[in-house]
Image: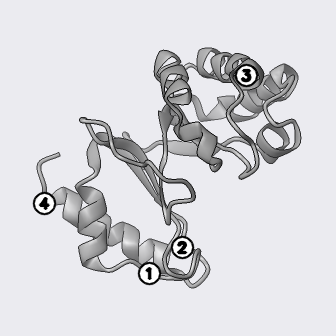
Amino acid sequence: MPEDFRFSVKLPRLITHVARLNRIEEEFSAFLDDTAHLGNKRGPLLCQLPPDLAFEPDKVSAALDLMQTEAEGTLVLEPRHSSWTSLEAEKTLAALRIERVFADPPVIDNQAPSDSGYSYLRLHGKPHVYYSPYTQTEIADYAGLMSSGSWCVFDNTALGNATENALTMKNILSSSTL
């Protein structure tokens, strides 16, 4: 394994979908213990929220703060409810130093990248989610959204397209100056 290789780890559905970020201290601590063996190979933690989990600051801020503080690394958020595009949600995430994931196809609007680009892209395939491959042109466009140190996860795995798309992205990024 290359020296600089790291794993991105997705939070369990028990935390995001079952508990819905409520009273997650014990589950999150167990998750961190379960992934501790990765050591410095553990990269960003992905928190993908259920589509019906709206942004309610009094309900989610404490959980996000706990996760960001305890994770000792990068926490990225993939919200899938439109309320997460509100100015209040953006301010909350900025204050906690949590970035939103760029997802394709988009589940919610308002995915405009920050001036520095995205740090985490999840590409699920389109028009058929999990199945469709991306073209070289599409991959080059997504590479343009990335900044140095960004992560890109291809989730169009159903027909094996993710591997070829990831290698195409690697070749594009290797020839660019991010």
Mark 2 secondary-structure assignment: loop
Tell me which numbered mark, 3 or 2, is placed earlier along the sequence. 3
Residue lying at 85% horizontally and 42% vertically, measured from the top left: 14
Tell me which numbered mark, 2 or 1, is placed earlier along the sequence. 1
The three-letter code of the residue at mark 4 reads Ser
Label 3, label 4: how far apart the Cα atoms are:
40 Å
Residue lying at 71% horizontally and 52% vertically, measured from the top left: 51
Residue 133 image offset from top left, x and y in percent: 44, 81
The three-letter code of the residue at mark 3 reads Ala
Mark 1 secondary-structure assignment: loop
Q: Is residue 42 left or right of residue 136?
A: right
Residue lying at 38% horizontally and 77% vertically, measured from the top left: 134
Tell me which numbered mark, 4 or 2, is placed earlier along the sequence. 2
Residue 123 image offset from top left, x and y in percent: 47, 63
Which callout, 1 or 3, points to the residue nearer the camera? 3
Up-down: is 1 above or below 74?
Answer: below
Tell me which numbered mark, 1 or 4, is placed earlier along the sequence. 1
Label 4, label 2: how far apart the Cα atoms are:
24 Å
Q: Which mark is residue 156?
A: 2
Label 1, label 3: how far apart the Cα atoms are:
35 Å
Mark 3 secondary-structure assignment: helix
To which quarter of the image does residue 5 belong? Answer: top left
The three-letter code of the residue at mark 2 reads Asn
Mark 3, residue position: 63
User: Badge 4: how crowded within 10 Å, few (<14), some, or many (20+)?
Assistant: few
Q: Is residue 40 left or right of residue 144?
A: right
Mark 1, residue position: 133
Q: Which mark is residue 175?
A: 4
Residue 59 image offset from top left, x and y in percent: 77, 23
